[in-house]
Amino acid sequence: MLNINTMGAWNYRPSERICTLGYKNEGYYPSDDEVNDFRAWHDYLDDEDLTYDNIVNLLIDEEYEIAKECYKDVKFLIDEENFTYYDVFLEQGYYDGFYINIDIHQYPKGYSQKLEMQKELTKIKNILTQSINDHLMVVCVPHWCTTWYNQKESLDIVNNNIKKERELIKTL
């Protein structure tokens, strides 16, 4: 079961390669404006069953469903590919959310395997880019106080780190 409640430090483990991409949800709780917008949008102003607390719970449930869909979609992207040189997998955070973990599985031996590793790196870049653009994930630096980057910064970090990884593969 996917947990999206925040409790504290060290939620995600840092990836060995490229970057850590995490689903960013810091204990979502709707604002008064969101509750009022929900009421206005759904014309529930006179419905006695939809109290402030009930609307908050509905909005939190909606956020939970969004997180589950993102998890399922990103898992599909990863499971769709076969990796030889990298381990790419989705992990649930210790406290909340989920993240993409990327580690080296096997180092290449010879030029043809380096080319295959470069192709895998392109697949990884596509997964990371799509996860950022479509599935509410961003680059994070897991630590006691996790650093989060916005969407544009995350795309830049992924592109720069992929370039560095490509250069590293050439030297193996």
Image: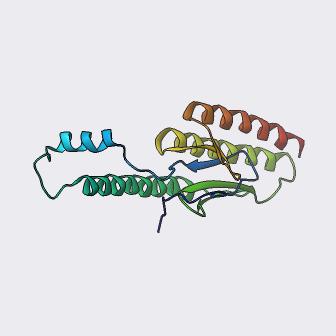
Q: Nearer the viewer, residue 92 or 144?
A: 144
At a point 61% along the width and 34% down the height, the residue shown is: 155
Q: Where is 10 relative to 114, above or below?
A: below
Give coordinates of residue 102: x percent, y percent: 69, 54
Q: Dividing the picture into quarters, in which one does residue 82 lie?
A: bottom right
At a point 31% along the width and 38% down the height, the residue shown is: 33
At a point 60% along the width and 58% down the height, the residue shown is: 8
At a point 72% along the width and 45% down the height, the residue shown is: 18
Horizontal side, residue 17 vs residue 92: left or right = right
Horizontal side, residue 138 vs residue 47: left or right = right
Q: Nearer the viewer, residue 80 or 62?
A: 62
Q: Where is 76 relative to 35, above or below?
A: below
Q: Where is 144 relative to 42, above or below?
A: below
Give coordinates of residue 14: x percent, y percent: 71, 53
What's the image's color scheme?
rainbow
Horizontal side, residue 51 vs residue 152: left or right = left
Give coordinates of residue 72: x percent, y percent: 46, 58
Give coordinates of residue 38: x percent, y percent: 24, 44
- Residue with the most extreme bottom position: 1
- Residue with the most extreme right position: 171
Q: How many marks?
A: 0
